[in-house]
Image (spheres, helix red, strand yellow):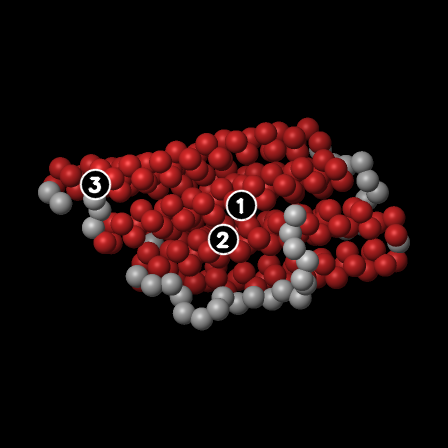
Amino acid sequence: MDFHIRSAFDKDLEAVQANVMKMGGLVENALLRAAEALERKDSALADQIRQEDRIIDDLEELIQTECARIIALRSPTASDLRTVLTVMRICASLERSGDYAKNLAKRSLVLSGMPEVPGAAGAISRMARSVVALLRDSLDAFASRDATLAEDVRQRDAEVDQMYNALFREFLTHMMEDHRTITPCMHLHFIAKNIERVGDHATGIAEQVIYLVQGHLPEGERPKVDATQLTDG
């Protein structure tokens, strides 16, 4: 690849990676605001988050299109191709995480008219903040090509699983003690599961960073603590 082609490729890659970081910031913000909408019973904020998801979707489409264009026009070498493919995978994880934030907002709209489950919204917010910290660190690891930070994210995902499992048990207790809480607790469970899934995507991004830096995915199963079997909604 001669200098001019290399320069054009680097410029294209910088632009697409900048958009990935922008997309990550939007997803982090959506998740935190969705948890805030739940805690404050703010239907207007929840509806705004739901509508703004299209901005994340549009950015994902732009990034994927640009990556396809880079591959088609620049014919990147093996290491450069690995970078482009990593960007595409990270972008897909962020888009899915944005969908989970939107789902959280949609369920908070439903919950605003239901009996409150004591302490649940605060616990959901704490879990959301923990997951956003994972997501932020995984993207920082990508930006700085820091495999050590990426591995740290991978290990910390177990903490999110433990928070989810504790919430799951708490919701079961509420439902058994007061049948009026069954419907809101089911919605809250799905919200907690959605947030836990974002943690999985943050961990997946971290694994892609390790692949990008080291040329291979981490060996062995990632740490996982899931004492439940219910699917997410």
Choose between 138 and 12: the one closer to the eye.
Answer: 12
Label 2 belongs to which residue? 202
Label 1, residues with CA under 10 Å away: few <14, some 14-19, many ≥20: many
Q: Secondary structure at mark 3?
A: helix
- Circle 3: residue type: Arg
- Circle 2: residue type: Ala
Does residue 2 appear left or right of residue 91 in this picture? left
Point out the image quarter for the N terminus. top left
Looking at the picture, how far across and down is residue 161, in whole percent? Answer: 61, 61
Is the C-beta separation of discs 3 and 2 under 8 Å?
no
How far apart are the two marked residues, 3 and 2, measured between alpha carbons? 29 Å
Residue at image point 53% right, 67% down: 223
Q: From where the camera sits, is residue 107 visible?
A: yes
How far apart are the two marked residues, 1 and 2, measured between alpha carbons? 9 Å
Q: Secondary structure at mark 2?
A: helix
Label 1 belongs to which residue? 97
Choose between 132 and 23: the one closer to the eye.
Answer: 23
Q: Tell me: residue 42, above or below residue 172.
A: above
Looking at the picture, how far across and down is residue 97, in whole percent? Answer: 53, 45
Q: Based on the displayed image, in which of its 4 quarters is residue 106 positioned? A: top right
What mark, if any, has residue 74 been given in the picture? 3
Residue at image point 85% right, 59% down: 176
Is the C-beta separation of discs 1 and 2 under 8 Å?
yes
